[in-house]
Amino acid sequence: MASKKELVRFKGVGDGVKINIDAKADIYEIVYILENKIIENKAFFGDGNCSVKFDGRDFSPGEKARLTELLKRLLPLSKVSFVSDEPKAAPSNDWIVEYKEKVSGEHPAERVTEHKEDRPAAEKEFYSVFRSNRARMYEGFVKTGMTIRSDGHLILLGSVEEGAELIAIGNIIVIGGLYGKAHAGCNGHNGSYILAMDMHPELIKISDYRKEFIYEETPPEPEQKKEEAKRGFFGKLKHAREQEETLEEPQETEFSAVALVKNNKIVVDNFTIQTFTNPKNMI
């Protein structure tokens, strides 16, 4: 594995600098390393009026935007470009043309060129998904006024009370009840999702999208919620079995669901194991 210094490498070329970026490194780590290297090597860039060309990988639109913003902030006079954007010479197919002419007897001057109308490219939604092995696991009851944060994914074994909040750069998974607020993809990852075993939140945010929830029914009393939270997942299962044994109908108040961005808005779908094991179905 390449060291952190090797993830971003500078090379002086012609009228500027070529910055080689590791093809597999996380873009957020690259931005952090690049910013520090530019600050440490200000003399290398002089007054900043130079050409800066990025190379080493096929950059996504989101990556290009983040790198360009960083360069314009640190080196306002620089001209930023990407090697992957440069037109590549098409392979020579002269031998194919020559062969077709021999077979068909057609002369190049007799060839008719079809003029097709230029059609605008279909507008596509761009999803920025946070892929990382970093995850914070928190076990307990998140009380009113508390905020739990994670610089990766966030997994909570417990419940979130009204007035409490979960914030994560990646995804949020609550193995319990979500009754407060949750913000996934807080650094702009609109492909993140929020999953809860009991989804009754006050507010959900994914990237810059937000959805508030208003309930007509009276929510459970705080003491009742605390009692349910203390039971935990297996405690609830045991309680349900005890109700079955006494021929009592268990109350179906829980709503297992996943919240994600679709068509530029947050939607809440029923959670199924197929949805969770195939993230492509969630986008």
Image: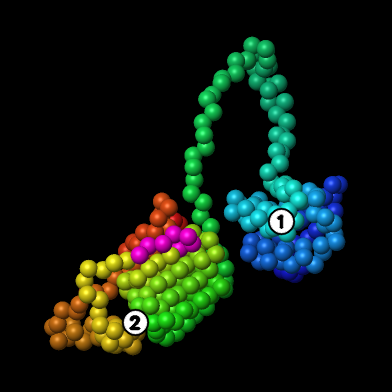
The location of residue 46, given as percent across then percent down, is: 85, 56
Q: Give the mark nearer the N terminus: 2 vs 1.
A: 1
Depth order, front residue of 205/154: 205
- Say which amino acid is labelled 2: Phe
Q: Identify the main secondary structure in magenta.
A: strand
> Which mark, by number, is residue 71?
1
User: In the figure, is residue 219 to the left or right of 84?
Assistant: left
Residue drawn at x 34%, y 61% as measured from the top left = 269
Identify residue for label 2. 233
- Say which amino acid is labelled 1: Leu
Q: Which residues are magenta?
A: 206-212
Above/below status of 79 relative to 94: below
User: In the figure, is residue 8 to the left or right of 273?
Assistant: right
* Mark 2 secondary-structure assignment: helix
Give residue 20's quadrant in the image. bottom right
Instruction: Name the quarter where the N terminus is drawn.
Output: bottom right
> Which mark, by number, is residue 3?
none
Give residue 103's quadrant in the image. top right
Residue drawn at x 42%, y 81% as measured from the top left = 145
* Mark 1 secondary-structure assignment: helix
The location of residue 230, given as percent across then percent down, is: 33, 88
For label 2, the crowd category at 10 Å Cα-Cα, with few meaning under 14, some 14 to 19 and many 20 or more, is some
Residue drawn at x 68%, y 15% as measured from the top left = 108
Indicate whether residue 210 is drawn in magenta.
yes
Depth order, front residue of 108/269: 269
